Amino acid sequence: MRSRYPVLAGLIGVLLLTGCAPATVALQPSRSMVRNVEVTATFTKELGAAVTYDRRLVEPGSHATVSSRSGGGITVVTLMVQGFEPERWYAAHVHTDPCGVKGADAGPRFQNVVDPVQPSLDPRFANPQNEIWLDLRTDKAGAGTGETTVAWQIPPDRRPKSVVIHTKPTATRPGLAGMAGARAACISVEF
């Protein structure tokens, strides 16, 4: 399709290619804006993009990819892993802070509506509709995928910073809701 304004179309193309944009244009965040994030990382013993705390379950050299799409009133997050201990369940949750030297450094699970009592064990707050849970089971080769969709967008002023992989599936009963065993590994993600 040919532009009715070829000079204007050419100028816009040059601006886009050079990364320049008119200084007078300001985009305001809105509920419909889409934010896509993807991180692929290799787990290491030292702090980096992905760190393993339990080398038996998540060996150094294993891989993970986290992808997130937040926009239009929903958020979809996918976690794909390779090289984990085969044929076992893992829980994975989005957490508030980046990975650290210790598993606890990633902070609590990210919640859309924050439980005033932390750690959150109340199923009214600790549930897969208010948090992002990515529980998965690995196959014989140690690969697995967890995916979830929640009916809310990640707030731009309160973005979570990691995905923590836990040693057990996520509990849902009162008093234990959201609990999933020790923190086996962590991937830093700027959601």
Image (cartoon, helix red, strand yellow):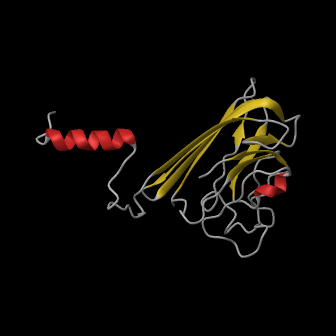
187 horizontally vs 38: left or right: right
Is the residue 22 above or below the residue 42 in the image? below
Left or right: where 189 falls relative to 121? left
Q: Position of residue 6 (x, y in %)?
A: 15, 38
Residue at the top extreme?
141
67 to 132, vertically: above or below: above
**72 sits left or right of 7 in the view:** right
Q: Residue furthest left?
A: 4
Along the line of sight, the residue nearer the viewer: 155 or 183: 155
Q: Quadrant of the N terminus?
A: top left
Is 157 located above or below residue 4 in the figure? Answer: below
Above-or-below relation of 176 to 50: below
Viewer can see residue 85: no
Residue 123: x, y in percent?
70, 66
Q: Residue furthest bottom?
A: 116
Is 154 on the left-hand or right-hand side of 120?
Answer: left
Q: Is residue 123 visible?
A: yes
- Number of dots carrying numbers: 0
Residue 107 or residue 10, whichever sits in front: 10
Q: Residue at x 64, y 59 (%)?
A: 131
Q: Which residue corresponds to the image point at 72% horizontal and 42% vertical from the top-left?
A: 49
Q: Quadrant of residue 178?
A: bottom right
- Residue 92 position within the rendered picture, expressed as x and y whole percent measured from the top left: 72, 47
The picture quadrant where one finds residue 18 is top left
* Percent coordinates x, y for residue 149 in the rendering: 54, 51
Q: Which residue shows up at 21% across the image and 41% down it?
A: 9
